[in-house]
Structure formats: C-alpha cells, structure tokens
Image (cartoon, helix red, strand yellow):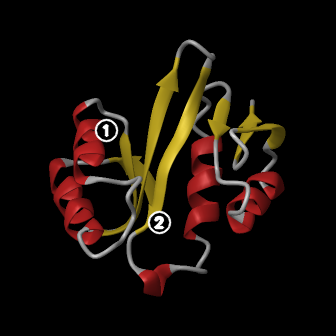
Amino acid sequence: MELRKATHQDLMKVVNALRYKDLPYITKSLVESDYLQQRLYVVADGAKVLATVSLVPEPDYNYTAIKRLCILNKKNQKKGIARFTIRSISNLKIGKIGATPWDTNNGMCHLLETEGFILEYKFNICWCFYSKI
C-alpha cells in the first residue's frame, strides 16, 4: 500500500465509489475541489484505490487538517487501512497535523490517540480536536 497524491484517474475511481456511500460530509464537489487544489490523496494497492483523504492547510491555525478520510469499499474496513493512512500522513513531515472527528467516533478517536495524537479540546458539543507535531 502507498499514500500518494490523487491522479485524475484516481479521482474518477473515488467519485464513482462515493456514489454508493451515504456520506453527506464527503460530496463529489468537495472531492473534486480537493483534487483541483492538489490536496486529495489516495491509499492505493497498485491500481486499486482503497481509501481517500484530504490534507487541507489551515494557515490561520498553523496546521494541516486531515479531512474526509474514507475507506471506499466496506469489504476493506477493519484491515488497517485507516491506521496506515494516519501513519503515512504523520511521516510526511508537514508540521502540525490536526483532525476533528466526532466525539462519538470512538474508533477514529482511539486510532488517533494510539498514533500519538493528543486531544486538545472538544467543541460544538460533538467535535474533538486532536493534533500531532
């Protein structure tokens, strides 16, 4: 597996896969915008795209945000792809990294903590902010 910037062909695969998911926070237009701004990444195994994630600079807060992490096929869940993605992002050496999962997303919160992210605060009742330098 590898984490890499998405190509146009990857974008088409991601958009197609997302058509079958009910994820209102990951829309076709957001993914296309991320691609055009060169912040869309994929986790690939050869030509097969397993997951997508966007790395969005937050210059006002001096960190890069992990956004829209999605395992594209349900059969690939629970196979360590999200952990691989978080570790690979951490190895990019892009400075401070932030993530804002829902506080009810116990799996992602636990994953971030086991990968060295620190819970800095909770806000808006249901969101958490984790960071790692």
Closer to the N terminus: mark 1 or mark 2?
2
Say which mark, if any, is on residue 8: none
**In this rendering, would 19 be left or right of 5?**
left
Furthest-top residue in this view: 60
- State the residue at coordinates (74%, 40%): 130
- State the residue at coordinates (74%, 61%): 111
**Picture quadrant of residue 13:** bottom left
**To which residue does mark 1 refer?**
34
Which residue type does callout 2 highlight? Answer: Met
Residue 9 is situated, as x and y percent measured from the top left of the image, at 16, 56
**In this rendering, would 124 be left or right of 2?**
right
Which residue type does callout 1 highlight? Answer: Asp
**Picture quadrant of residue 80:** bottom right
Q: Determine the CA span between mark 1 and mark 2.
A: 22 Å
- State the residue at coordinates (58%, 50%): 88
**To which residue does mark 2 refer?**
1
Q: How many marks?
A: 2
Residue 133 is situated, as x and y percent measured from the top left of the image, at 75, 30
- State the residue at coordinates (31%, 38%): 34
**In this rendering, would 124 be left or right of 77?**
right
Secondary structure state at the residue bearing disc 1: helix
Q: Please rate how many residues cluster around mark 2, counting C-alpha atoms within 10 Å: few if below 14, some from 14 to 19, many from 20.
A: some
